[in-house]
Image (spheres, helix red, strand yellow):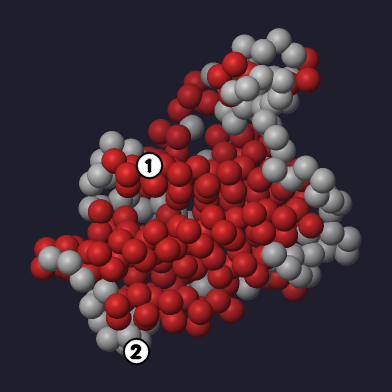
Amino acid sequence: MAVDNAYEALTEDSRDLGDRWAYGTGFQDPLSGVDATLPTGADLPAAARHVLGLGDDALVMAHRLSEWCTHAPELEEEVALANIALDLLGQARLLLARAAQLDPGLRPAGVAGHVPDEDALAFFRSAEEYRNVRLVEVPHGDFGHLVARLLVFSTWRLGVVDRLTGSRDPVVAAVAAKAVPEIAYHRDHAAGWTLRLGDGTDESHRRMARGLAEVWPLVGELFTTADAERPAIADGVGVDPATTRAEFEDVLRRVRGQATLGPPGADLRRDGDAPATAWGRTGRHTAALRDLLAEMQSVARAHPEGRW
């Protein structure tokens, strides 16, 4: 990019930048130099659906976090949550784009050709076509609920993404390597707030405990693999989330123990997360996702031929 900042780039007259859309162009490619060859011998449609689910998780969680702008308890937390949302949005962009490369049939029909694949997938699919876990889509509650959801989500996602650094797909592996330090910060940030609230006042302790209780019925789904994803796992492109549960529970036990939210060795399994079903990965969502997408997709759908 020939200019010094993104705002000047919006008016730069350069054919190299091409058409700008929701994510913009003219910025450094984070995957520059990465081998984009499709993994040979792999079930590419299954790989695409596995990657799509991980991208949808990040996209929807980013939107939920962005809803906290102007609502967080302090200015520094507003900035932190916005930055975490941007991290996840960046991961979503790369993963959705790769999913479309793995299976071009995922791109919604009728979307203008100048719209990048990641934008087409983000803004022109219905709720039933999204493959995110339900944890990320449910409406936010109070700040304790936010912290509980971020702690659970980032602890789970870190275990999955860390293993994806060994994916047979070089792009997925590169995206994962970039995402690991980002998600590690997300988890540490959420854990820090869990300690402050859990071991704080009686009121903050009550709210933190309630937040964990509210998100826990959605935990079982995180460790359940949809049948459509199993070929990608067998091919070495994807990761079986069930392999991360022991690590997840160990982290949650230690955080809960230090936050006085239960004995460190307490069993985190509850009746609420069984039987586990791959709800979101099979397109079965709560009504909240339709409402979220109606807002997130409104501008793109109102101007489907738009260029900027």
Outermost residue, bottom side = 265
The residue at the point 54 percent across, 55 percent down is: 182
What is the x, y in percent for residue 282? Answer: 55, 59
The residue at the point 78 percent across, 70 percent down is: 235
Name the image quarter holding residue 234.
bottom right
Secondary element at image label 1: helix
What is the x, y in percent for residue 188? Answer: 42, 63
Q: Quadrant of the N terminus?
A: top right
Circle 2 crowding by C-alpha within 10 Å: few under 14, some 14–19, many from 20: few
What is the x, y in percent for residue 181? Answer: 57, 59
Q: Give the total of numbered labels.
A: 2
Which amino acid is tagged 1?
A: Val
Residue placed under numbered mark 1 in the picture: 79
Which amino acid is tagged 2?
A: Gly
What is the x, y in percent for residue 250? Answer: 44, 81
Residue sitting nearer the eye, 261 or 106: 261
The answer to whether mark 1 and mark 2 are in CB contact below 8 A is: no
Secondary element at image label 2: loop
Outermost residue, front side = 4
On residue 125, the disc is none
The residue at the point 24 percent across, 76 percent down is: 261
Residue placed under numbered mark 2 in the picture: 265
Name the image quarter holding residue 30.
top right
Q: Is residue 135 above or below residue 248?
A: above
CA separation, marks 1 and 2? 34 Å
Name the image quarter holding residue 257.
bottom left
Whether residue 164 appears in this view of the structure is yes
The residue at the point 48 percent across, 58 percent down is: 185
Circle 1 crowding by C-alpha within 10 Å: few under 14, some 14–19, many from 20: some
Outermost residue, right side = 40
